[in-house]
Amino acid sequence: MHLFERDRLTLPAAIQLTRDSLLTHAERYAFHERKEEELRQYLGKDVSIMRDREGGQVKTLTMRQFRERIEAGERISLYGGDGCACFSGEPE
């Protein structure tokens, strides 16, 4: 899989890199997880750098929540939602 597409990280690649970072660089991931929480506390808002799009609703997904899902063995969808159907073979 090519990680970058048109000078930006594709969603599946971003999820994979985040998961890999958690598994191979746990201390670095923990540092950024703490920084995200500090920002949330400072702003007093439910913000995060990731979004959970499961079930058709968009909500925040903190690094802590992402880590807990990975540690629990939960499968993380690389594509989430219905997608764009660009590989469906149907004409536009």
Image (cartoon, helix red, strand yellow):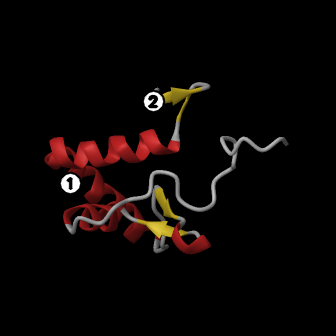
Q: Residue at x 20, y 44 (%)?
A: 28
- Indicate which label's residue lies in the foreground, 2 or 1: 2
The Cα–Cα distance between marks 2 and 1, rounded to whole angstroms, is 23 Å
Q: Which residue is mark 2?
A: 3
* Residue 78, placed above or below residue 24: below
Kind of residue at disc 2: Leu
In this orientation, does residue 57 appear? no
The residue tagged with tag 1: helix, strand or loop?
helix
Q: Secondary structure at mark 2?
A: loop
Residue 34 placement, left or right of 1: left
Mark 2, other Cα within 10 Å: few <14 / some 14–19 / many ≥20: some
Amino acid at the residue labelled 1: Ala
Kindly indicate the quadrant of the structure image that contains residue 58: bottom right
Dot 2 and dot 1 residues touching (CB under 8 Å): no
Q: Is residue 52 left or right of residue 19?
A: right
The answer to whether 36 is drawn above or below residue 59 in the figure is: above
Q: Residue furthest toward the right? A: 92
- Closest to the observer, 14 or 34: 14
Residue 26: % across, % down: 16, 48
Is residue 17 among the parts visible in the rendering? yes
Name the mark on residue 30: 1
Q: Residues within 10 Å of mark 1 (few under 14, many from 20)?
A: some
Please tell me whether residue 73 is drawn above or below residue 7 in the rendered image: below
Task: Give the residue drawn at x 23%, y 64%.
Answer: 73
Residue 31 image position (x, y, % from top left) = 22, 51
Q: Residue at x 45, y 62 (%)?
A: 48
Q: Earlier in the sequence, mark 2 or mark 1?
A: 2
Within the image, what quadrant is residue 64 found in?
bottom left
Residue at the extreme front: 89
Residue 65 location, x and y as percent? 32, 68
